[in-house]
Image (tube, helix red, strand yellow):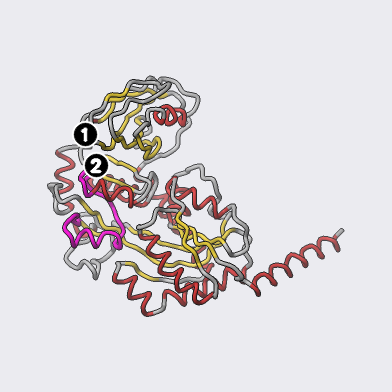
């Protein structure tokens, strides 16, 4: 019996070694779990081109957005561990979501092999020029005078863009309202159109809009001022000492990928980010190119989890709940230039997702943005975008009244006592 086990292990080891020696023999898919046009997409396309040259096979960028990065991340977790499907993800998937206690469709530790850090990107608190605040002091004063009136966008519930502003709210004792989107590519048009008034954005996708005057910067989330924006003060120096907001883009492979392949990938990333043209491109875009060993990335994952766990506890935010009793308390018309009214007859539901499904039935010109979330454990919110004024068809739990135009609407639910 022992001999059989030994022969089986020896056979598996030989197969893995042989695979590593011949790899790669076909194109490699690099999954980015966000929409095209964001910081991750910029990083992925920059390294994919150079990695293709170094590995001798094409590295193809595949944007698989949705569920705050969980859809693309789960897809890679379920992929064969042969080195042909890789993931370029952030600390959202591997530190923030676990710190929030979210039920994820993957295990960030057991389902992945850390490969290498690739780049750091600092966030800019960007605002529509119409917002009557040009720095953090003015923003805090305005938000305190009009609690909840200012809307901020994010790339999804539990994203760095979301929690970094929730942390600001906690540190500065002011209130602004969260409107989550599928990605920055979807949020930017609404930010520019003043449907939402501000958003934390990565430096790369923000610079063009700052230069054109379509957006303005209230502060940067870096520890020190950015070389590309030397006149924009850090948020920390504007009354938020110790505050930082950034993302780290890292490369992962499915668990079980042969160590030889993982190590070769890490070596290739280190080579690529050290190339003068790649470094120049990254730095000019506000990205900080880095490389690491797989062990160094694994250690950073642990450190980031501990850091975000402390932040989540400080903020006191929760994103998933077991209480099934919910009722609608009203809708907020401040989200759009046109008033919209929705009334949901939902006092008891088998699952919280049923509330989302009922609201989804109202669609017919309505784009679901995100599901339920809560700030205080009692009041829950549900965001979606509305277009046109067609009435909902078929069975629905409520009546919908709307006027021409489009915008974002926030529904507020409250636990039934």
In x, y percent, where is residue 42? 37, 63
Residue 322 painted magenta: no
In the rendered image of this protein, does residue 301 appear above or below residue 25?
above
Residue at the location (30% across, 48% down)? Answer: 187
Per the rendered image, the range of residues in magenta is 192-218
Instruction: Describe residue 79's horizontal placement relative to residue 202 as left or right.
Output: right
In x, y percent, where is residue 38? 35, 57
| Dot 1 alpha-carbon crowd within 10 angstroms: few under 14, some 14 to 19, many 20 or more | some
Q: Which residue is mark 1?
A: 334
In which quarter of the view is residue 237 placed? bottom left
In x, y percent, where is residue 385? 32, 37
In the rendered image of this protein, does residue 329 appear above or below residue 207?
above
Earlier-in-chain disc, 1 versus 2? 2
- Disc number at residue 151? 2
| Dot 2 alpha-carbon crowd within 10 angstroms: few under 14, some 14 to 19, many 20 or more | many
Query: Does residue 375 show up?
Result: yes
In which quarter of the view is residue 145 placed? top left
């Amino acid at each position: 019996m022992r001999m059989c086990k030994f022969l089986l292990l020896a056979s598996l080891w030989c197969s893995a070694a042989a695979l590593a020696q011949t790899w790669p023999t076909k194109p490699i898919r690099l999954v980015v779990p966000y929409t095209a046009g964001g910081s991750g997409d910029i990083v992925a396309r920059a390294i994919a081109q150079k990695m293709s040259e170094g590995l001798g096979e094409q590295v193809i960028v595949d944007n698989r957005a949705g569920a705050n990065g969980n859809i693309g991340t789960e897809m890679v977790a379920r992929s064969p561990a042969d080195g042909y499907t890789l993931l370029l993800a952030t600390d959202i998937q591997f530190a923030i979501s676990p710190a929030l206690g979210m039920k994820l469709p993957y295990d960030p530790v057991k389902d992945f092999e850390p490969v290498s850090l690739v780049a750091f990107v600092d966030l800019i608190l960007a605002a529509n020029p119409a917002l009557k605040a040009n720095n953090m002091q003015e923003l805090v004063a305005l938000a305190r005078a009009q609690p909840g009136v200012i809307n901020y966008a994010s790339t999804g519930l539990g994203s760095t863009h979301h929690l970094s502003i929730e942390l600001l709210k906690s540190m500065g004792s002011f209130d602004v309202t969260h409107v989550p989107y599928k990605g920055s590519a979807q949020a930017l048009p609404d930010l520019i159109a003043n449907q939402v008034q501000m958003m934390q954005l990565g430096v790369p996708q923000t610079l063009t809009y700052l230069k054109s005057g379509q957006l303005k910067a209230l502060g940067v989330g870096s520890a020190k001022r950015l070389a590309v924006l030397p006149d924009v003060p850090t948020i920390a120096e504007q009354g938020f000492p110790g505050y930082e907001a950034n993302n780290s883009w890292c490369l992962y492979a499915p668990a079980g990928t042969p160590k030889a392949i993982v190590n070769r990938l890490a070596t290739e990333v280190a080579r690529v980010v050290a190339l003068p043209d790649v470094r120049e491109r990254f730095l000019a875009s506000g990205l900080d190119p880095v490389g690491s060993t797989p062990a160094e990335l694994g250690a950073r994952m642990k450190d980031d989890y501990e850091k975000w766990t402390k932040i989540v506890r400080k903020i006191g935010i929760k994103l998933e709940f077991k209480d099934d009793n919910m009722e609608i308390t009203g809708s907020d018309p401040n989200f759009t230039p046109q008033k919209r009214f929705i009334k949901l007859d939902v006092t008891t539901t088998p699952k919280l997702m049923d509330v989302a499904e009922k609201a989804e039935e109202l669609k017919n010109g309505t784009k679901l943005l995100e599901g339920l979330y809560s700030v205080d454990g009692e009041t829950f919110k549900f965001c979606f975008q509305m277009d046109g004024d067609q009435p909902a068809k078929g069975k629905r739990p409520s009546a919908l009244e709307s006027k021409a135009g489009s915008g974002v609407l926030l529904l507020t639910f409250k636990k039934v006592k």
